[in-house]
Image (cartoon, helix red, strand yellow):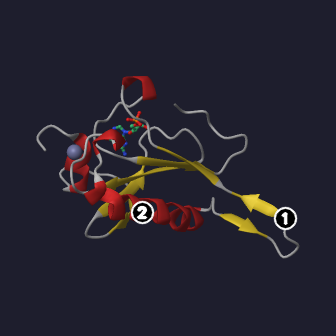
Amino acid sequence: MDNCIFCKIAAKQIPSKMIYEDDDVIAFHDINPAAPVHFLIIPKEHVATLADCAEKHAALLGKMALLAPKLAQEQGCGYQLDATGNKAGGFKTLFNTGPDGGQEVYHLHMHVIGGAHPWSTKS
Ligand code: 5GP
Ligand code: ZN
């Protein structure tokens, strides 16, 4: 879509610090991180908001959700249980939707924010 900054990042017309790519999605570091680890997972297809998703996007949303813990692990903020069952690490996932949801870029994106506790309250 013309003039969509995340479409341009997905098309590599604008550089980003990419950490993952496949046929459907890319993930890259947020330019203004709210925590030590802060990256975005976006579909390559332009979808403006979570509210614009339809049934046909279910697999895409599932892929994005499943990627979050995998990439968080790679970025050093994975969630795990240690050998004695204690919980450690972890991250926050966030879709801002619409003006009241604090959305600034109208191309669907999942924030993954971690590496610090207490978490950022980015909204
Ligand atoms: P929103 O408020 O729409 O949920 O968040 C948009 C996010 O995109 C913000 O955290 C902002 O820092 C990030 N962002 C905006 N423009 C760019 C850019 O050109 N490159 C990268 N890597 N992140 C961006
Ligand atoms: Zn777009």
x, y percent for residue 63: 40, 65
* Disc 1 from disc 2: Cα separation: 28 Å
Task: Look at the image and tell me whether residue 117 can be seen.
Answer: yes
Residue projecting furthest to the top: 100
- Front residue of 45/62: it is 62
- In the image, taking residue 17 as reference, residue 93 lies left or right, namely right
x, y percent for residue 106: 28, 36
Q: Amino acid at mark 2?
A: Gly
Q: Residue at x 79, y 61 (%)?
A: 87
Secondary structure of the residue carrying tag 1 is loop
Task: Look at the image and tell me whether residue 14 can be seen.
Answer: no
- Disc 2 designates what residue? 62
Which of the labelled discs sits on residue 19, or is there none? Answer: none
Between disc 1 and disc 2, the foreground one is 2
- Disc 1 designates what residue? 86
Q: Residue at x 55, y 33 (%)?
A: 122
Q: Quadrant of the N terminus?
A: top left
Residue projecting furthest to the bottom: 83
Q: Amino acid at mark 1?
A: Asn
Secondary structure of the residue carrying tag 2 is helix
Residue projecting furthest to the front: 55
Q: Residue at x 61, y 33 (%)?
A: 121
Packing grade of label 1 (10 A; few <14, some 14-19, many >=20) is few
The image quarter containing residue 23 is bottom left
x, y percent for residue 99: 37, 24
- In the image, taking residue 107 as reference, residue 80 lies left or right, namely right
> Where 88 sits versus 7, above or below?
below
The image quarter containing residue 44 is bottom left
- Ligand 1 location (quadrant): top left
